[in-house]
Image (tube, rainbow, N blue to C red):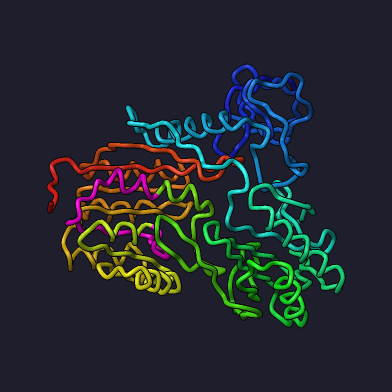
Amino acid sequence: MVLRIDRLSYGGRGVGRVDGYVVFVPLTAPGDLVRVRITRAKRSFAEAELVEVLEPGPDRVPPPCPHFGPCGGCTWQHLGYGAQLRAKEQIVLESLERLGGLHNLPLRPILPAPAPYHYRNKMEFAFHPETVLGLHPRGRFDRVLEIERCLLPSPVVSEILQTVRSFVREHGIPCYDNRTRTGRLRHLLVREGRRTGEILVGIVTAPGEFPERKALARVLAARFPQLRGVVWVRSGSLSDAVRVDALEVVWGRDFLEEELGGFRFRVRPETFFQTNTEAAERLVEIALELLDLRGEEIVVDLYCGVGTFTLPLAARTRTTYGIEMVPEAVEAAHENARRAGISNVEFLVGDVRLVLPELVRRIGPPDALVLDPPRAGAGGRVMRKIGRVEARRILYVSCNPTTLASDLRELLPFGYRIRAVQPVDLFPQTYHVETVVLLEREGSRSRV
């Protein structure tokens, strides 16, 4: 089948049509004339694989990474960066309009990332009995593609990858197989402080022994002076996701330090922290600009994590509260606030759905609510509870425009209107996009 690609969808695939019938094709660009092979057909759309680019579109560029295509780490290296930004801006608009029923939106131009490559501060590589160590191929979590270098993190991360792979081969350590549930090594986790230069390495294994761990740590410490710690994580998870069942410090310490927005954070293996430090600083700046804080407000930060937004908010408010479900993250947030000398902040552990109403009964309606939920969104029940709080302003930071659309739709019946929609690119070479939305409740008054 031959078709012309006219746009890009959320998920990264190109969209073409044959007599009005929609066909999704990965690794294509707008304007491409392509030959495809249908792999799955439904009544309203089909999925296809790319066979040949007959005529490249104006936005197609040669991908700089030799692993691009089979590797699942990137989806858009074949697109010029300007085209990526235009596609993400359009995806945000279409998601809010089509899925959220939101129109006449105050959409701002998307803000580009400071750097299109070498921006990630966290990488997870997978072990496999056949290829030892690398990244999963596109759509295949039971296989691993051996790669020499990745262009998303800094070059030192690829050097660590190669060092660990050589060590594993030299010592004949068995790698884990997801299909048979056999083998020992599961993942290599590398975290890097982009502002501090500090590096933390985690070796994730199946339950059992790992007698070579100290020898591996010595090799890494000798070669990489910026290394601050090597940790051994045991995970019995049946899925491919890293779950920390037990953690042992093999060498150094179990955290690195990173700076973001003038604050210093301790980041551990399991800590959620924005993966693009430089772009995340811009995200915080946008949040503060949109909220326009005067210093006397009371603000509640939902899904606060280790305090990435909470601490900058607290520095500009009378009191800020952070709510987080993960106790270890709250412990880290307390520590980060203490080290920053911030005392007008209180962190609470628990589910937002339960903790937020209790907090509001104690303090009354806050001036502003900030939420940065996981990719799955906050969900209808949480959003309705947020709406009943009657905060003057709500700032929603989203990493998924589709769940953002449905969550925002829940707030409008509570008298909120969207005042600004700001897309921000934190993840170049992928279809992921952050969006900051400011909502204001009509008729509400500020304490200030």
Left or right of 353 on screen, residue 109: right
Residue 265, above or below 99: below
Quadrant placement of the N terminus: top right
> Residue 12, position in %: x, y?
60, 37
User: Disc count in the image?
Assistant: 0
Residue 332, above or below 413: below
Which segment did they paint magenta?
284-308
Query: Can residue 390 be seen in this snapshot?
Result: no
Residue 211, above or below 298: below
Residue 217, above or below 289: below
User: Which of these two is toward me, 414 or 153?
Assistant: 153
The single residue placed furthest to the front in the displayed view is 225
User: Which of these two is toward me, 150 or 32?
Assistant: 150
Left or right of 151 on screen, residue 197: left
Give residue 348's quadrant in the image: bottom left
Who's the residue at 71% across and 35% down the image?
Answer: 63
Q: Is residue 287 magenta?
A: yes
User: Which of these two is toward me, 64 or 189?
Assistant: 64
Left or right of 399 on screen, residue 251: right
Who's the residue at 51% across and 29% down the image?
Answer: 86
Q: Is residue 271 magenta?
A: no
> Residue 239, position in %: x, y?
64, 64
Query: Can residue 259 be seen in this snapshot?
Result: yes
> Residue 137, position in %: x, y?
73, 49
> Residue 388, position in %: x, y?
22, 53
Who's the residue at 35% across and 48% down the image?
Answer: 396
Give residue 245's quadrant in the image: bottom right
